[in-house]
Amino acid sequence: MTIKLDDLSGPEVAALINEHLQNMSALSPPESMHALNLDGLKRPDVTFWSAWEQDELAGCGALKELNREHGELKSMRTAANHLRKGVARRVLEHIMEEAKRRGYQRLSLETGSMEEFQPAIKLYASFGFQECGPFADYEEDPNSVFMTKEL
């Protein structure tokens, strides 16, 4: 698997982000959906990576800089035909390495609280992320789980 910095210009990436947004909106009420669209992922404070198995898109993830010491994990998604192959684990490892390289002291994330998000929550917990309160501009929300990890 190859993980590469991505400018979000490819049709495969656009389709995966669109699938991600549709899935998130089906699971979360609008006020609780915090997934970034393509324009949001192209902002200068966000770095986006895609994961490829030969020439097939396997997944993606992003890192948003909240400040010089704190990053936020965004837009983790595995393509449907690559589920349970370790894609999310590899992307998460890559993003955590980059956060450490940047000198971040903390990496945080927001995910859904519904049953469909339990595999993601378990993955994050296996990397040492712990539940916390809202961070950055987030507010307490029964549909959200906030997690953080000191690096």
Image (cartoon, rainbow, N blue to C red):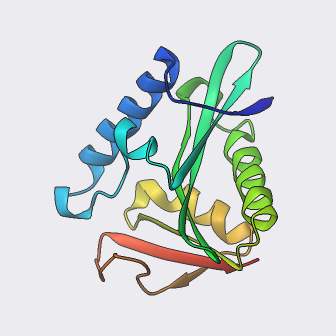
Residue 149 in the figure: left or right of residue 137: right
Residue at 52 percent across and 51 percent down: it is: 46
Residue at 44 percent across and 81 percent down: it is: 135
Q: Which picture quadrant has residue 84?
A: top right
Quarter containing the C terminus = bottom right
Quarter containing the N terminus = top right
Residue 100 pos. (x, y %): 79, 67
Residue at 36 percent across and 71 percent down: it is: 144
Front residue (pair 18, 81):
18
Query: Which residue, as the protein is rendered here, is positioned at the far left?
Result: 30
Residue 136 in the figure: left or right of residue 13: left
Q: In this view, does 132 lie above or below 50?
A: below
- The mark tally for this picture is 0
Residue 105 pos. (x, y %): 71, 80
Residue 136 in the figure: left or right of residue 55: left
Residue 139 pos. (x, y %): 29, 80
Query: Which residue, as the protein is rendered here, is positioned at the far top?
Result: 55
Residue 131 pos. (x, y %): 54, 82
Q: Which picture quadrant has residue 60?
A: top right
